[in-house]
């Protein structure tokens, strides 16, 4: 099939790399011709021609997207002509933190206490109700911890609200978590569901730096609970494709933070670490193919992000159990340039391998 991707970043690039062996072709609509996906398919650059989305749709049999910030109106219009997966409901819900949290509430999925905020006065009321510490976040468009303000004291109300630049925001109670986890799953057109194991994520300055898969010391009932939350979300949104939920592990159990209607940075380990990668499974799902097995191949996998600078990538090339993935992007502070996947059969091998890559970690 011909798959059209709205977006042309590294996620589109890795979708294409996984989809060509299945005889699919790819087209991308991105901002410019030098984006990470550009050489992996037909590029319909919006900087050349604003109508290029129409050309992409004319090219494609099915459309998917790389980002939850994709315009819902565009997706709605396209879906009058050809299928778009994940569908409008998944996109509409996940691009707004308030709508996402309302769905968690509706489905009895635990999340941080929250209140929507549209003014400084709203923020004052929200702080009184939720208490501090709390995090003020923009309702839409936030990523990698951007558009967030950690409030510790009531004296910060004016400063916190001003930092949102007047846009609709959400105040969330601060969750005292032990670890950050994520769960990636995929749902097919035929309603089949497959789940990857929970993985453990370490962030620095809001950016994911290290994922360990599977997360260590997870009781089976914790994985089951996470899968139950996931299943209710997949079914409620009639989601087709990969869905990711980010969770906090707390003394009192799992608390869901947010979700993404797409392949996710914390699932990159699955390229070499699972029987079927998250990318291949997304492609399989949206093209109506049977879903692939999600079982990990190795006792341990890990993913180390390459952020800002390419760094000493030859270290990874000289490790028998490491795989380098670069995205063909130029260096810039905080930019995701690539990642290194590690596989290991013992805890010691995992620890030693991560230690060898310490130059990539803050
Ligand atoms: P987010 O953009 O919502 O994923 O937030 C970025 C990071 O901020 C998360 O990975 C957490 O480390 C932290 N964070 C976000 N929300 C909360 C919260 N309600 N309580 C504690 N930490 C949070």
Image (tube, grey):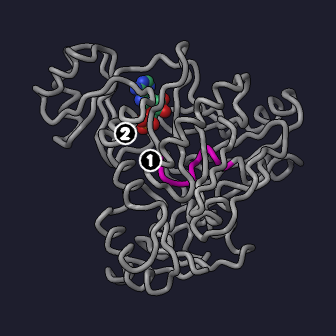
Residue 81 horizontal side relative to residue 122, left or right: right
Number of the front mark, 2 or 1? 1
Mark 2: C-beta under 8 Å from nearest atom of ligand 1:
no
In the rendered image, residue 55, in percent from the top left (x then y), is placed at: 42, 85
Which residue ends up furthest to the front in the rendered image? 190
> Seen from this angle, which residue lies furthest left?
121
Task: Check the picture and name the quadrant holding the C terminus.
Answer: top right
Element at label 1: helix
Residue 236 is tagged as 1
Q: Is residue 130 above or below residue 86?
A: above
- 192 and 299: which one is in front? 192
Q: Which residues are magenta?
A: 260-268
349 drawn magenta: no
Residue that badge 2 annotates: 103
Give yes or no for residue 264 being in the magenta stretch.
yes
Q: Is residue 187 visible?
A: yes
Query: In the visual, does 362 lie left or right of 92?
Result: right
Which SS class for mark 2? Answer: helix
Q: Is residue 102 left or right of residue 293?
A: left
Q: Quadrant of ligand 1?
A: top left
Q: Residue at x 16, y 25 (%)?
A: 158
Q: Which residue occupies 29% across, 30% down? A: 136
| The quadrant where residue 290 appears | bottom right
**300 in relation to 125, above or below:** below
Q: Position of residue 67 (x, y in %)?
A: 44, 57
Residue 340 percent across, percent down from the top left: 71, 48
C-alpha span from label 2 to label 1: 9 Å
């Amino acid at each position: 099939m011909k798959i059209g991707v709205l977006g042309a970043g590294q996620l589109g690039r890795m979708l294409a790399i996984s989809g060509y062996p299945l005889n699919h072709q790819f087209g991308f609509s991105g901002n410019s011709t030098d984006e990470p996906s550009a050489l992996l398919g037909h590029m319909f650059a919006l900087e050349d021609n604003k109508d290029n989305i129409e050309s992409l749709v004319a090219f494609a049999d099915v459309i998917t997207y790389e980002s939850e910030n994709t315009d819902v109106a565009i997706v709605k219009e396209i879906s009058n002509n050809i299928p778009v997966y994940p569908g409008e409901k998944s996109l509409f819900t996940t691009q707004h933190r308030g709508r996402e949290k309302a769905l968690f509430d509706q489905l009895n999925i635990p999340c941080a206490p929250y209140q929507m905020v549209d003014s400084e006065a709203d923020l004052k009321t929200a702080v009184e109700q939720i208490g501090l510490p709390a995090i003020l976040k923009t309702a839409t468009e936030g990523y990698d911890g951007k558009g967030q303000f950690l409030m510790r004291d009531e004296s910060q109300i004016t400063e916190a609200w001003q930092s949102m630049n007047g846009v609709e925001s959400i105040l969330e109670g601060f969750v005292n978590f032990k670890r950050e986890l994520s769960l990636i799953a995929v749902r097919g057109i035929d309603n089949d569901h497959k789940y990857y194991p929970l993985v453990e994520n370490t962030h620095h300055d809001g950016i994911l730096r290290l994922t360990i898969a599977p997360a260590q010391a997870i009781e089976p009932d914790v994985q089951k609970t996470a899968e139950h939350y996931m299943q209710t979300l997949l079914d409620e949104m009639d989601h087709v494709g990969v869905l990711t939920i980010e969770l906090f592990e707390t003394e009192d159990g799992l608390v869901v933070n947010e979700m993404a209607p797409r392949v996710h940075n914390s699932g990159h380990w699955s390229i070499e670490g699972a029987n079927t990668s998250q990318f291949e499974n997304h492609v399989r799902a949206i093209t109506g193919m049977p879903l692939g097995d999600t079982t990990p191949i190795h006792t341990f996998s890990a993913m180390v992000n390459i952020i800002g600078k390419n760094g000493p990538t030859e270290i990874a090339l000289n490790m028998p159990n490491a795989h380098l993935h670069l995205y063909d992007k130029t260096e810039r502070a905080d930019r995701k340039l690539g990642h290194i996947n590690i596989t290991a059969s013992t805890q010691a091998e995992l620890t030693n391998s991560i230690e060898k890559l310490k130059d990539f970690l803050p």
